[in-house]
Amino acid sequence: MKTIRQVSTLQFTLMVSAFQISVAFLSLPRELARQAGTDGWIAIFFGWGMATLASAALVKVMKNSPDGSILDLIQRYMGVWPSKMAAFIFMAYYLLLAYDGFMIASLVIKLWLLPSTYIYVLVLLLLIPTFQIAQHGFQVIGRYSEIVALISIWIPFVYLTTLRHARWLYLLPVLKDGWLPVLSTVKIMFYPMLGIGLAFFIYPHLVKKEKALTAMVISNTLTCLVYLGITLVCYVYFSPDEIGKFNDPVISIMKSIELQFIERIEVPFIAFYLFVFSCIWIPSMHLVSMNSAWLLGKDKERGHLAVWCFAVAVSFFIYRPSFIDVARVNNFLNLAGFVMEFALPVCVLLYVAMTKKVRGGRRS
Amino acid sequence: MRWVKTLSAVVMGCTIFLALTGCSNDKTNLEDATVPLALGLDVIDEKLRYYISAPVFSRDIKKKSREGGGIAEGLRQSRNQQDAQFPGAVAGRNYQVIIVGKKLLQYKDWFKVLDVKFRDPRNTVTDRIIAYDGPVTDVIHFQAKDQPPTSVFLRGLIDSGSRRSTTVKTTEQELHRQMHDRAITPAISEIMIENGKILLKGTTLLSQEGQYRDSLSYQETSLLQILKKEAKPGVSLTFPVEGMQEQLPFNTDLVSFSIGDISVKVKSSHDHDRFQYHIKINAFISITEKFLEYELLENSEEMASHLSKEMKKSIEKLIDKFQKHKIDPVGFGLYARAYHYPLYKAAQDNWGEELARAQFHVDVDLRIGATGAVE
Amino acid sequence: MMKERSANHEQEEQITPCLNESIGRIQDMFTDTPDLIVRKLTIKQTGEKAAIVYMEELTDKTCINHDILAPLQLESGNPSDDFITNVGYVKPESLWAKLRLNLMLGNSVLFIEGRGTAYILDTKGLPTRAIEDPQQEPSLKGAHQGFIEIGSQNIAMIRRYIPDQELKLRRYIVGRRGQTAVTLMYLEDVAHPEIIKVFEERIQSIDVDAIINTGELAEFIEDQPLALLPQILTTERPDTAASQILQGRCVVVVDGSPSVLVAPVTFMSFFQTVDDYSSRWSISSFLRMLRIFAFFIAIFLPGFYISVISYHFEIIPMKLLLTLGESRGQVPFPPFVEAIIMEITLEMLREAGVRLPAPIGQTVGIVGGIVIGQAVVQAGLISNVMVIVVAFTAISSFIIPNQDMMAAVRLMRFMIMVLATWFGFIGMVVGMMTIMGRLITLNSLDTSYSTPIAPFKAADWKDTLLRVPLWLMNNRPLSTRAIQAKRQGRNRGWKEKQ
């Protein structure tokens, strides 16, 4: 029971979905609006399509290695050194993702809640539960995602109350400027769908491996439904002329909700949203430590995790990022994510298929 | 190697502890802060003046609020001035109302003064915006023994008024939307001071840049809300019925009714090189006041058609007013943008003028549902 | 080495057939033990000399007099018997170590001249108390019986609820000096064998002087005794213990302690009471949800108050803002100090109330609650909202049915208050994350602690927030990993016949 910890299908679905939603939730409506105006929501469907295709390729690749992660697969088919290289690349990639998550979360907190607190202090604070949870592996991270999903159920209902001020006419006419703006927006949909790459590492832990593809499709659908919902809500609330002016329309919208017993509901909302934010950096830090442990050949993931957490905190002390850095990192991650999670499975799949054919041909 | 582990654990623990303890920079206790509840903006002698009114948190002081003000070029910039007048840090997080003087409304783009409220996320945007014809200092320094603090009072006034559609409820966020959306022009509430009391006056209509254009009375505001489809059931309207006026202290040709279910349909089209709007209003009404001797039970259809005609006239007069001032507080532009986008896009920078050329066809159909307890 | 060998030698030492030597040996062993009685007698049947040795207060003297001395001395029966006695349990024994132990446990030892074995007779008569309502877990509708300090009586009380032959017991002796009998009770065809194995392993590896209370045993076999949250349930009620066994869990009865241990348990087990199952399902569900709600209130409310006042007062509704500001305006302390003062005062009052006898305890409660609360507000030391917050928190923590969980809540509250005063809402959220992290990483005897919330087991939710009507709970909870899952068929069969 202790060697390979089991992850259930529900946990897998929620882990991937939470990973995808956590950071992109806040920035997606703004990006879509700036690129495609009120028709941006159509681009989400395209994003779903691409993510599903990539997931299918991913699952097919991992079917070749039911008991090991992608690194075992690469080692088996290509050798030890390529697998070490892959481990290094994955480590860097997930480190960047975790850094992105911390950066956005702490910048949002600094902007909306605690402006005068130093950013490295916030990051240090957030690292404490990260270390506690990430050291135990995907089983515990899966449980954590389940709990986060459970306690986040109220968020859609709060957004639905803003529909009272909604003007559905803002959405019309659909495709007012034609298909071109929509299609050119599709290229920014990679970043919000990052998370399917988790399957590379979770697949060996799954209990029901045959349901992996279904689970991934469900989580992509769930993510896209959430995106669609929040984008539409933002679009019908803000007029087309002003939506580009808000940096975080998702949070700004909450400022106008008036309840009897509490005002300014966005303050507890942002504090609460940290739970969802954490769903990107906890798996990422775990994967960073896993990959670095693979690189050094030792098994002491916990020590690696401690070192990486400390490194992240120190890096925030040395360099204080700003919102411009966020935009830069996001753009880079869009590209990097495309390579790592969309292009890589296809390439590995082709390589494995070819190798199998060659080996099979040699054998016969 | 064990000492390496213990040493590193101790080092990390110390760093965490030190970092975490030295950081309560953001803490402002409630009793140490000054939370202004009302903001007033005015222009006197070509200079922007601001006023703030904050409650006093002390049981012993009789006066419930403290006022302050000054000349400033920008709100955030005037922070130091504000801090100089109040003990404790002034926090802009709890505003209830913003009162704007008419003089300020003469200037284009005065709304940019409020940019800081949107830029700093800790500020409120649900405060009500109110226009006042006169020096704003009168409102801010208004003290009455039988009223709660002015800011709370004003907010309650606007909220209850808007519920009965005697005024609009424009929050700062809503005003931002109306200002920036070229298909609609802003409308804010208006108050006046009469006989030492603050009263609700109606609505103020502004141009797209925020300049004062016109004022509406209670009933005109109700009609505006009806056209905007924001009227809540229970709106009360009063119209004279033709041909039965008598000269008495109270006009006996007036009939009041309140609207129950109402459906407003606006159809837009483009014909003869101008926009055409067909507005159809169907409503169930119940008569609430009638002075005439009139047999309602038998002649209810006649009464209904009279009232419909009167209502149609009033609405058309209202729309004429809009067209005269080239404003669009109802938001007819939204329909144009939604259904006739290319044509709208051509005119979107001067929508007011385009609307002034448009033609409106209003059709009102009222049905009397109830007459109350007496006939 | 020499000492060890002599100890082993001592363990193996056997009695000699000579009676006087045995008696002499006993008196050498038990110096300074005036309650050791040696009664010499002659057995009527065979005419042998014998002696019976027992500890005065540990034995049931009536039993000795009537069931041993009388038949031995007065009756003559079947010559093929070893000797005549009416005592049920008789065991021949020749090792001095065992004889000594049995004497200390309350049994009597019979030495007969010329025989190489002595006989242990069960005459235990330890002082007991009457069975009464358990103090810590009173119930409205359940039985008013609680465990007492005699292990065998406790086992009997449990057996009464489950007269099933599958109810097995495993007995271990724990403690070198204490020699406490620890009994593991479980249903053989229901409880998972791995759990039993883990239990056995952990109990048998305890090397300690003595176990006085069940709590000590719990600390030895828990997965993480350093954690704040309890991972093993202790109960004083036989009905609770019996229902836990029926769900597939194991119960450990410790002789000499009125609490029994139940494991493996989940987080939700600490919020279930016996009354839930005897009351109607709607009120039970409501109370369950109330308890969970109270759990969160008790931990987070003071922290929430501190962070709202210090960092985020913009979320307070308008009217409350004015009154709150006014009441805080008089207080000289920052909110954290205010909160700490009131919380510590309340904890001291609570602890004082525990030790005092009943009438004084009530008065102290009233004095503390009303007078101090009122006076403190009037003096302007604490704001009245703070008093309300603290009182509400205290009431919420009292709702939690289990003492260990209540204690954990009391401590977590202080951590959250510190975090809230440093970082406001963010601190509270990070605290919440840490608590959640603790919950999901804890194991109770190698089963996940936070089931059925995470990992999500839909079937177990029937008894978590809601208490689903009994006729829907057909299977045992998945969290116990029972190997035989179905526990009821149709138990409203009369309805279908209608």
Image (tube, coloured by chain):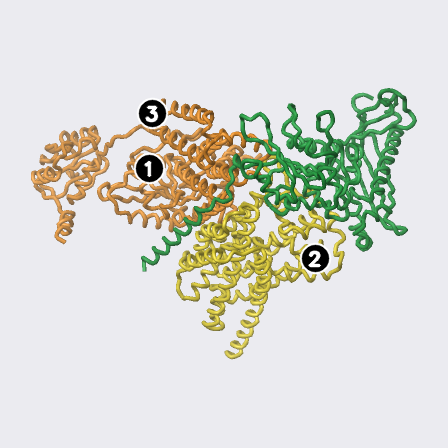
Expressed as whole percent of the image width and height from the top left, the position of residue C387 reads 47, 30
Q: Colour of chain C?
A: orange
**In the rendering, which numbered label is found on residue A98?**
none
Chain under label 3?
C
Residue B349 in sight from this viewpoint: yes
Q: Amino acid at mark 3?
A: Pro
**In the rendering, which numbered label is found on residue C155?**
1
Q: Amino acid at mark 2?
A: Ala
Q: Which chain is green?
A: B
Can you identify the residue that label 2 sits on?
A36
Q: Colour of chain A?
A: yellow
For the residue carrying disc 3, how many other residues have a C-alpha within 10 Å: few (<14), some (14-19), or many (20+)?
few
For the residue carrying disc 2, how many other residues have a C-alpha within 10 Å: few (<14), some (14-19), or many (20+)?
many
Q: Earlier in the sequence, mark 1 or mark 3?
A: 1
Q: Amino acid at mark 1?
A: Ile
Left or right of A48 on screen, residue B187 = right
Chain under label 1?
C
Left or right of A54 on screen, residue C55 = left
Q: Quadrant of residue B11?
A: bottom left
The C terminus of chain C, quarter of image: top right
Residue C478 in sight from this viewpoint: no
Can you identify the residue that label 3 sits on?
C357
C38 and B242: which one is in front?
Answer: B242
